[in-house]
Amino acid sequence: MSMDANPNTTSGTSPRLDSKVPAGDTADKWENHKFSMKLVNPNNKRKFDVIVVGTGLAGASAAASLGELGYRVKAFTFHDSPRRAHSIAAQGGINAAKNYPNDGDSVHRLFYDTIKGGDYRSREANVHRLAEVSVNIIDQATAQGVPFARDYGGLLDNRSFGGAQVSRTFYARGQTGQQLLIGAYSALMRQVAAGTVELHTRAELLDVVLKDDRACGIVTRDLLSGEVTPHSAHAVVLATGGYGNVYYLSTNAMMCNVTAAWRAHKKGAFFANPCYTQIHPTCIPVSDDFQSKLTLMSESLRNDGRIWVPNGMDDARAAAEIPEVDRDYYLERKYPAFGNLVPRDVASRNSKTVCDEGRGIGPLKNGVFLDFQDAIARDGLEAISAKYGNLFDMYHRITGENPYDQPMRIYPAIHYTMGGLWVDYHLMTTVPGLYSIGEANFSDHGANRLGASALMQGLADGYFVLPYTIGDDLAGLLGQTAVPTDDPVFTEAVRGVEDEQKRWLSINGTKSVDQFHKELGRIVWEHIGMERDKAGLEKALADIPTLREEFHSDVRVLGSAATLNQSLEKAGRVADFFELAELMARDALEREESCGGHFRSEHQTDEGEAQRDDENFAHVAAWEWHGLGTAQTRHREELAFEDVALSQRSYK
């Protein structure tokens, strides 16, 4: 159905959504636009204060780059060190269109693969820019000393990832995110030592402050002392990651949350495509009802591991006892051109299908096999260990099963979120002076992110995009001082944060924050997970507000606000998850199509693939907050496809 019938939906591109995409050929837009943007000369950069919230790959690279340019930067992390950011959890690699293997890669092919992998729901200009600057990221990281794997000749090595037929993924064994973060961290700490960056650790953003409708600072709480402090700047950059922990069980670190982005949303920053969530196909299956965290096994394992299940239902034989004739290598069977390296959404849905058919394996019948026996026989145990040894060791420690001797058990799990704060071509949100980079924004991946592209986007935004675009805005503020922190807008914001904490501590209910979070996660996974339908989404929209009301009246938060209090921290984060979850369900219900990670069972092809509705839904949905209990307005940014023709995705 057309969304024009919804009274809270704009028709055509909303006048509130100016993407600022420059004119001209897609391949030339970024290079030409860099020349047309306003500049801030080196002596004037030191007159501007910039706040960067988050010190993962996007935040650390942005803070380091802005500090190197001469801006006065304040960087904030709620960790005790920037090195604890969740970016370290990325295992498999980072994409770049270097074409070192000489196998046909190019900037245009990476651009095309990313648009197609996202099921044609991303902005072409942003994606092409990402592909362009990907080549610079590798040079930057290598110069920092990131120990990328090398081939027998000493050159940087590449491997394949899902959704591509070329090898463009650079990697550092199974620790690529960690090594890249150490590189960005070293660049950041160099600027801290130089005095251009002021680093604030154990500080959590709890409000974004505006004056005259422009972002002018933030309010943070010190997680150790409880002190609430205002901070002022000419611009604020949010690099705070995604919202996968709304599901409770995810591969995200347990402190990952949506609070920074959501508080910005409630101050006027539109939230785009919240229903676009990614299910990673290779995670260790849930083992019991008491589990609070899931573990990712790198997508790189799909290079050599073969995914299969028994042909028959409820086959209790050990993997080694099941002959080839009784095995179904279902991805290789259905998608011969890509095999086990189909995109994540495709691989995940197929794993769910075979388990739903009764062919799942493991004690709970909630997994599929990822088998390396053929690769070990072909290449030798030493070669496989050199590629994946740390991943095999991690799996062995967690499960007690040796993947050198028997197949891994894997099943899809929440891993990444493609939705986020809406940003224009300059990475600015709908609030002037407020930027969002990395996974915190919506911009580059459409409805499904290709593997090894998260690290690429975070570092592209931080090292090579934001340092250009932020100057275009700040140039117009030359001569203006930052809003002082004794201004009434800061006083009011601090009071609001303190009042919120008092409210949580005064409820004195009977259930812990974690109990409510777990129940919310169950609703979200069941109805807004791998497969959605109208009835389930409507049920979620009924159940979530009911549970939210109970949360606000019966949660028990012990302790004091004047000290370390993790229950108090969680209360605010889970409250934001409740509001986000309701918007996710609404967004999924309104989007009457299937695309990428958003799979509506009513909209699928005869072969069970996602069926898009390009006539009515080739647009970004960006939601505007009007207050709790009031329906949000759904704004549209129409997507134009000038270089990649819209077509049904095929990986066969």
Image (cartoon, rainbow, N blue to C red):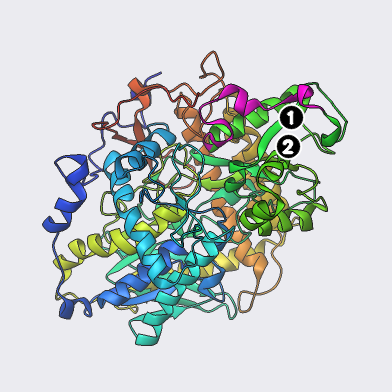
Q: Which residues are magenta?
A: 323-343
Between the residue at mark 2 and the residue at mark 1, the CA separation in whole angstroms equals: 6 Å
Badge 1 amino acid: Val
Query: In the rendering, at what x and y percent does residue 118 appear?
Result: 42, 36
Query: In the rendering, at what x and y percent does residue 411 appear?
Result: 69, 39
Q: Which of the two residues, 8 or 365, is positioned nearer the viewer here?
A: 365
Q: Which residue is mark 1?
A: 309
Point out the tag, 2 or 1, that comes first from the N-terminus: 1
Asked if residue 17 lies left or right of residue 376, the reply is left
Badge 2 amino acid: Phe
Q: Are marks 2 and 1 in contact (CB under 8 Å)?
A: yes
> Looking at the picture, does residue 626 appear above or below residue 150?
above
The numbered dot on residue 369 is 2
- Residue occupying image coordinates x 47% and y 42%: 450
Q: Which of the two residues, 170 or 469, is positioned nearer the viewer here?
A: 170
> Looking at the picture, does residue 2 appear above or below residue 204?
above
Asked if residue 611 lies left or right of residue 502, the reply is left
Query: In the rendering, at what x and y percent does residue 495 appear?
Result: 46, 71
The numbered dot on residue 85 is none
Q: Which of the two residues, 332 or 277, is positioned nearer the viewer here?
A: 332
Query: In the rendering, at what x and y percent does residue 204 appear?
Result: 51, 69
